[in-house]
Image (cartoon, helix red, strand yellow):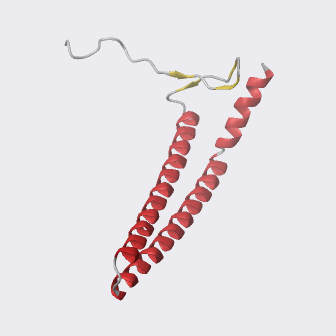
């Protein structure tokens, strides 16, 4: 089997340092605590990306609406431009509301699972060493 690596798989170790020169406790890749912490971090980053996409869409609506208003003099185009600007405000409001809701739910989940206490315990344990 030339296409496959014959070496046995070993779990990776992730080293997290809190202060320069002071390693935190080693967590195995299969550790539930590490998996939960990484999942929470991925969810937080995905939430931020989603907010940025709402902002990008709102900016696109504003740019299109302003362009339509300034390029065309007919009343229908001005109304369409103002509708696009209003849609931008609505899109931004929905995006910010959704971001805050998901962030609040994620904080409740993290405090309920106890991830913050595990992170604090790990950093306190590394300070003792």
Left/right placement of residue 76 relative to residue 120 reads: left
Of 42 and 55, the residue lying toward us: 55
Q: Furthest-right residue in view? A: 128
Judge whether 75 appears above or below 63 on screen: below
Q: Is residue 75 left or right of residue 43?
A: left
Residue 42 percent across, percent down from the top left: 50, 43
- Residue drawn 59% across the image and 22% down it: 15
Seen at 34% across and 82% down, the residue is 77
- For the C terminus, the quadrant is top right
Q: How many marks?
A: 0
User: Horizontal and vertical percent for residue 110?
Assistant: 62, 48
Picture quadrant where residue 10 is located: top left
Asked where in the image residue 27 lies, by quadrant, the reply is top right
Write the residue at 36% across / 14% down. 8
- Residue 37 sits above or below residue 104 on the image: above
Comparing 97 with 84, the one in front is 84
Q: Is residue 26 left or right of residue 58?
A: right
The quadrant in which the N terminus is found is top left
For image coordinates 48% across by 49% down, the residue present is: 46
- Against 2, residue 28 (above or below) is below
Residue found at the far bottom of this picture: 75
Is 31 placed left or right of 107 in the picture? left
Residue 127 position in % (x across, y down): 78, 24
Residue 26 x/y as whole percent: 61, 22
| In front of the other: 42 or 108 | 42
């Amino acid at each position: 089997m030339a296409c496959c690596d014959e070496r046995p798989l070993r779990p990776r170790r992730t080293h997290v340092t809190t202060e320069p020169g002071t390693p935190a406790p080693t967590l195995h890749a299969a550790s539930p605590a590490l998996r939960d912490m990484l999942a929470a971090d991925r969810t937080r980053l995905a939430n931020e990306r989603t907010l940025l996409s709402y902002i990008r869409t709102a900016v696109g609506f504003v740019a299109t609406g302003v362009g339509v208003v300034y390029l065309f003099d007919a009343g229908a185009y001005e109304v369409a431009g103002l509708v696009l600007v209003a849609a931008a405000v609505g899109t931004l409001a929905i995006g910010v509301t959704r971001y805050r809701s998901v962030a609040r739910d994620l904080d409740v989940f993290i405090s309920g699972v106890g991830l913050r206490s595990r992170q604090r315990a790990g950093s306190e344990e590394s300070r003792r060493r």
